[in-house]
Image: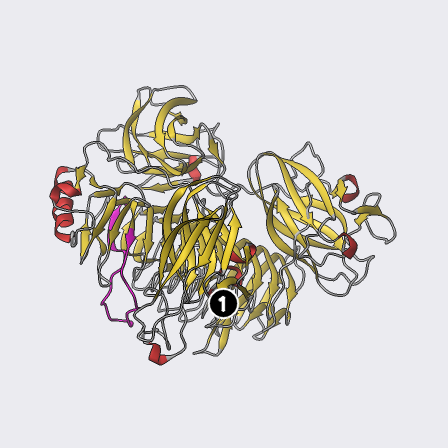
Amino acid sequence: MPRFRLAAVLTLVLAALTTTPAHAAALEAESAALSGGATTQTEHAGYTGTAYVGGYTDGNKGNAATTFTVSSAQAGTGTATLRYANGTGVTMTLSLYVGGSKLRQINLPATGGWANWGTSAESVPLTAGANTIAYRFDSSDSGNVNVDNLNVSAPVPPSDGTGLEGGFLSGGASIGTGVSGFTGSGYVTLNNQGSRVIRTVKLNAAGNINTTLRYNNSTGSPKTLSVYANGVKTGQVSLPAATGWATTQQSLPLRKGLNLIGYQYDNGDSGNVALDDVTVTGATALATRGATVGYTEYEAENGSTNGTVLGPDRTYRTIPSESSGRRAVRLDNAGKYNQFTLTQPTNSLVVRYSIPDNAAGTGSTAPLGIYAGGTKVKDVTLTSAYSWVYGLYPFPNDPGLGNGHRFYDEVRTTLPSYPAGTVLKLQNNGSSPITVDLIDTEVVAPALTAPAGALDVTAYGATSGSGDDTNAFTTAISAAKSQGKPLWVPAGTFDLTNRLTVDNVTIRGAGMWHTTIRGTNGLGGFVGAGSNIQLADFTFAGDVRYRDPDGVVTTHAAMEGNFGTGSLIHNLWVEHAKVGLWVNNADGLYMAGVRIRNTFADGVNLNNTVSNSRVDQSVLRNTGDDALAMWSFSASVTNSAFTFNTVQSPALANGAAIYGGNGNRIEDNLVSDTVYTASGITVSTWHGAQPFAGTTVVQRNTITRAGGFNTDWNSSQGGLWIYAESRDMTAPVLIKDVDIIDSTYQGILMTWQRPITNITFDHVKVSGAGTYGIEIFSPGSGTFNHVTVSGTGSGGLNNTTGYTLNRGPGNSGF
């Protein structure tokens, strides 16, 4: 199939500027630092300033660069718009770097002549202060363009922003603006018991960290709130009465990596105070899009190997089609290896791999050797027991049906500590071929200790590695709930043969690398049956090896049911479950810092009566259905959001989807490499969904190599899909600041027959599409402002139904 080829990246480090780049004057390339053969030229007309920069010729491949520097008053996502000329007649490529790191490959379509100038706009993460942005003629680029100038827009702060108003609010917490002097876009008021705000913070080192809370208390008397660090109550904070905005300091026990800092109006607090922001000593910036994670990821194909590099290929039921970046490395037999050099220290390793299944579909095994600096460290055992399905949906575990797919699984292991610069090698030490897709490394922190006053599950008969612990857990959970104490699960591996019911109870482990709660024969997990449920700091390793047919329940989700009000799920690792999290009822559920991998159905599904809930800062990989879904089936999901998540390679269906509902959002996510009957992000009335109401928002997301094909319908899905199936779509939908890169088929697809109206596309960029940039099979009308399309296989627009495009400013390519 035709596909857009991602452009390679230029190196451009922006020329020194003393003002914030809020649509300021262009930064002239001839005034920037030039290297590697890039030179100023004046041969071709139409440039701005005194010259343009050429020299991006084949003789300077791998070297030519233009370097600029820019200052920003705040952190966030800006837009870098490069003015260039490409008279070659075909699309050329360069590579874009920000802060010295390669951001992405960019596409520079032909401009119709060397005196004709075009623009290419890319979203770029900016930090407060000086930034570097780079456009470089790398060895993988085609180059041969001229560069004239660069405009950089003022950044849009992430929704976590600089104030608590960007955090997670529930229990009646509200955002106010009536008291002047606040920072950011507002402040948070906690005026009723149960109201809370949770802010995510990243630290490079653990410890007792000083925090400064900015508040307003004009009541004339001191007020108190409860303070939480990663879900553990650390005590009260007293907020004396003051005129105007005041501050108070506290030391909180925080971790390296992602932390949750919470303020809550509990029983015994006086509340009724406004909170502006919390400043944390040593805090570093969160990712501007996607999850902030503690691990470093290495693509196997970017390492060195004596094996076979597979792909790129997106053909369904091929291993590359399910691989990250659509490429992987196959180690066919003993002695074949894949190695890489650590850029960060590690004492652990995660390998995403595929090995052949056995004839019965029950799973085969293979050894994979781990070497550091040329010395063997250990073997890890790979298994196909949790991968490979066959035939047509729902894809039974029967090799006799043929058409095998869902090739990948993961294995994790701890290692001795290795510094950056160490060469780690993965070597096939057996006869079965091993395909390696990617590797994650991180420094695993020491095991956590039990919260004060917690009950220990081992005191109720649970024993690590000894067999069925279900009854011990059930008894311990009952005791913890009745005594109002958390339940502690120490380091070890504990086994379940059935689900555990949780309600008004906290279950905490020693960390996701230290405490494992394991399912058996497809069974085991947690069923929510009430409010104030907290699950934290452990791995749930399910034992699901096939997908149940629709309407049949023989296997369990890791977490499902009624989570009531005020529940919190964080720092969990979920794998080999039917579903990661399926919620039927919740108000104010917050899930953050969770890894969900290799499920046989959805990663997360917020279903029916879910409101004011949010999935945040989480990574979902190789899910067997939608990675993130809000499904308003018999009732509407309301005011809920998927924010700052990373979705990789869902084997079936979409990266993120909203099916009906009221006022829901998908914001600041990264979605890549969807496989079958799939889009990166979908907004739809499919699956019998309730009608849309309020404003549905999809903004500040990046969708890469997404889209798929539905063989039942004999039709394709786009990178972004708006699908009016069972109902008209007439409520407002806003698609804003979305980058759609290298779509397999359409960049944007709007279907099917029913009207889609009241939709706005604003600053949406389609960079590469296998077919059309925008394809429409629905009646209706929508507004298109600053929508750009380039690098398509079939054309910019295919409007088969006479859809009315209300074209505002800044559109091009369609």
Residue 358 position in % (x across, y down):
34, 72
Residue 233 position in % (x across, y down):
27, 33
Q: Which residues, given as a range, are shown in magenta?
A: 540-567
Q: Amino acid at mark 1?
A: Ser
Question: Is 344 above or below relative to 359?
Answer: above
Which one is nearer the viewer's eye here, 101 or 462? Answer: 462
What residue do we see at 40% from left, 55% from top? 620
Which one is nearer the viewer's eye here, 698 or 356? Answer: 356
Asked whether residue 325 is drawn in magenta, I would say: no
Mark 1 is surrounded, within 10 Å at the Cα level, by few (under 14), some (14 to 19) or many (20 or more) other residues, namely: many
Residue 729 position in % (x across, y down):
45, 65
For the view shown, which residue lies furthest in the right direction? 43
Q: Which residue is mark 1?
A: 321
Which one is nearer the viewer's eye here, 119 or 806? Answer: 119
Quadrant of residue 556 within the rendered picture: bottom left
Relative placement, left or right, of 290 versus 737 is left
Quadrant of residue 676 within the rendered picture: bottom left
